[in-house]
């Protein structure tokens, strides 16, 4: 397995700050906006953005964590069941502007399930999508992000992993490539 | 993440400790779901489930039906009292007719022990046993253990549970014993000699005939209903005498030097095995058991359905 860092910790930080600035540009004081991180890895992007924005705006933002396991379209097409994570949304999103946040936007299927799962908490006024990494030309569904940290061109056999200093020890984005035998 | 080790849920006896923990972990998520404003998830949109009840049931049938509907499955209900069983049809014929309507999963309650296993060996659908005679009632045992876990924490090691009442005729008792022992709890049974099976000690449970001694020993007491409908002869002189010796009232509960948890699988015979003030006291988790029943059944159906092969 070939491993290549495509975003180091310096650029990682810069990217997060830019995303936070873009959110602020569109949502100003976040009066009617809630941030929803998708489980399991999108919540880390949410946590970081929340920290930056709250320090900047000097107020607490309404944030939630959404698990989409039961809304997936690949139920019974996988070998093992996926163990669900926690959904933690203790407010109603009726008429709110929602920013859905995930780490990597790939096929778009997770986001489709996320939109479905979101409806259990009310009818939002508007939903936007923020992805820390957008994998170009890999979509299976007509879904695009409104905010993208970094766009990467990848093969569908490659894997992109966003790593966090809280978990993996270092902030970085890594591209994994499966080595082919006859290469 | 591993999968359930079984293809059907016939009894707790077939499950591993990992299976039970997987069911509990999945049920935690479903408990969140059923406490939301919209209590439904679309996971089982393309699954059809038949609830076959060859024996009367209100709570279990409603709980299963609700669990199935919360998972978005299509549900058909069948009860023996209003069907061709009365006209002499055999179990296999009845079920095959229902399966011909393309059913993926069958939930069955039947008065004969072993009926669920018999069925699972002969049909091409997942089977969930909702009680087979005096044999097992696995979903009840799982929801009981889940409720204990919710109240007393995940580690069952050293937890002491007493099951009081008609052990001989109770499928709940047998499933509970298997389930609690697999999780590491200590189990005692308590009741009149005539209602305790002779060889129950071989299952590794303690036997006690004095209710006060049993309650002083335990952390949790599961009070079973006297199943008069299954008793072909009289096993004790009168309900009044049973209630005096094995009924739990507030006076007895308050006289214990610790706060034990009171459970009951329902339906309650108020004033027989448990008095009204005990059933409604803050030590009782009877209604939590009912709520947890839906979440646990959702988890079981979800996990079994994930094994249905569509290809």
Image: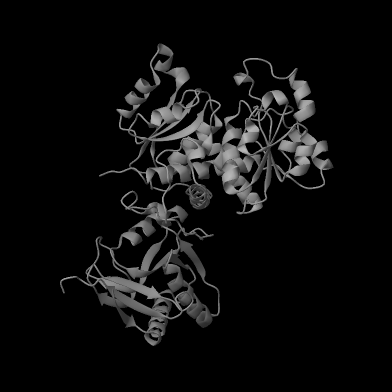
Question: Which quadrant, please, contains the C terminus of chain B?
Answer: top left
Question: Furthest-bottom residue in view?
Answer: A10
Res B290 visible: no
Given residues B207 and B256, the one toward you in this image is B207
Q: Position of residue A22 (x, y in %)?
A: 38, 79
Question: Would residue B184 appear left or right of B82 to someone viewing this image?
Answer: right
Q: Position of residue B93 (x, y in %)?
A: 35, 20
Res A120 visible: yes
Question: Would residue B150 appear left or right of A45 to someone viewing this image?
Answer: right
* Residue B119: quadrant of the picture: top left
Question: Would residue B279 appear left or right of A177 to someone viewing this image?
Answer: right
Question: Furthest-top residue in view?
Answer: B87
Q: Position of residue B254 (x, y in %)?
A: 82, 42
- The answer to whether residue B276 is above or below residue B70 is above
- The answer to whether residue B259 is above or below residue A10 is above
Question: Which quadrant, please, contains the N terminus of chain B?
Answer: bottom left
- Residue at horizontal 75 percent and vertical 43 percent from the top: B217
- Residue at horizontal 52 percent and vertical 41 percent from the top: B294
The colour mode here is: one colour
- Residue at horizontal 71 percent and vertical 36 percent from the top: B279
Q: How many marks?
A: 0
- Residue at horizontal 39 percent and vertical 18 percent from the top: B90
Q: Position of residue A42 (x, y in %)?
A: 42, 68
Given residues A101 and B153, the one toward you in this image is B153
Given residues B284 and B118, the one toward you in this image is B118
* Residue B287: quadrant of the picture: top right
């Amino acid at each position: 397995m070939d491993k290549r860092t495509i975003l180091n910790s310096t650029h990682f930080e810069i990217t997060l700050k830019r995303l936070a600035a873009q959110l602020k540009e569109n949502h100003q004081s976040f009066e009617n906006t809630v941030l929803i991180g998708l489980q399991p890895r999108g919540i880390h992007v949410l946590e970081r953005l929340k920290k930056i924005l709250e320090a900047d705006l000097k107020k607490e933002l309404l944030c939630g964590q959404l698990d989409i396991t039961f809304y997936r379209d690949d139920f019974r097409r996988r070998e093992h069941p996926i163990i669900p994570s926690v959904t933690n949304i203790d407010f109603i999103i009726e008429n709110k502007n929602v920013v859905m946040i995930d780490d990597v936007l790939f096929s778009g299927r997770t986001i489709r399930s996320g939109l479905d799962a979101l409806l259990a908490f009310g009818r939002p006024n508007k939903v936007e999508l923020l992805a820390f990494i957008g994998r170009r030309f890999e979509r299976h569904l007509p879904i695009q992000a409104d905010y993208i940290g970094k766009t990467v061109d990848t093969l569908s056999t490659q894997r992109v992993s966003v790593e966090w200093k809280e978990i993996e020890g270092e902030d970085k984005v890594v591209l994994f490539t499966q080595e082919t035998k006859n290469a | 993440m591993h999968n359930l080790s079984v293809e059907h849920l016939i009894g707790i006896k077939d499950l591993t400790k990992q299976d039970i923990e997987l069911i509990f972990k999945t049920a935690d998520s479903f408990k969140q779901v059923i406490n939301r404003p919209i209590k439904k998830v679309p996971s089982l949109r393309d699954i059809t489930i038949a609830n076959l009840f060859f024996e009367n049931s209100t709570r279990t049938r409603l709980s299963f039906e609700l669990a199935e509907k919360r998972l978005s499955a299509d549900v058909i209900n069948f009860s023996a009292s209003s069907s061709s069983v009365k006209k002499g049809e055999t179990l296999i014929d009845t079920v095959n007719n229902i399966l011909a309507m393309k059913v993926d999963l069958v939930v069955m309650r039947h008065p004969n022990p072993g009926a669920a296993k018999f069925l699972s060996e002969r049909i091409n659908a997942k089977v969930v046993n909702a009680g087979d005679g005096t044999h097992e009632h696995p979903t009840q045992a799982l929801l009981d253990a889940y409720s204990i876990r919710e109240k007393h924490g995940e580690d069952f090691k050293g937890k002491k549970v007493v099951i009081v009442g008609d052990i001989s005729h109770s499928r709940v008792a047998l499933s509970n014993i298997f389930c609690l022992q697999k999780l590491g709890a200590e189990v005692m049974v308590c009741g009149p000699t005539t209602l305790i099976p002779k060889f129950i000690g071989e299952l590794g449970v303690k036997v006690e005939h004095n209710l006060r001694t049993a309650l002083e020993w335990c952390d949790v007491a599961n009070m079973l209903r006297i199943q008069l409908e299954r008793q072909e002869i009289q096993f004790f002189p009168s309900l009044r005498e049973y209630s005096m010796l094995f009924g739990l009232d507030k006076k007895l509960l308050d006289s214990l030097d610790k706060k034990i948890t009171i459970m009951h699988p329902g339906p309650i015979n108020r004033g027989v095995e448990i008095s009204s003030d005990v059933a409604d006291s803050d030590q009782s988790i009877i209604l939590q058991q009912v709520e947890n029943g839906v979440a646990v059944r959702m988890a079981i159906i979800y996990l079994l359905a994930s094994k249905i092969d569509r290809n």
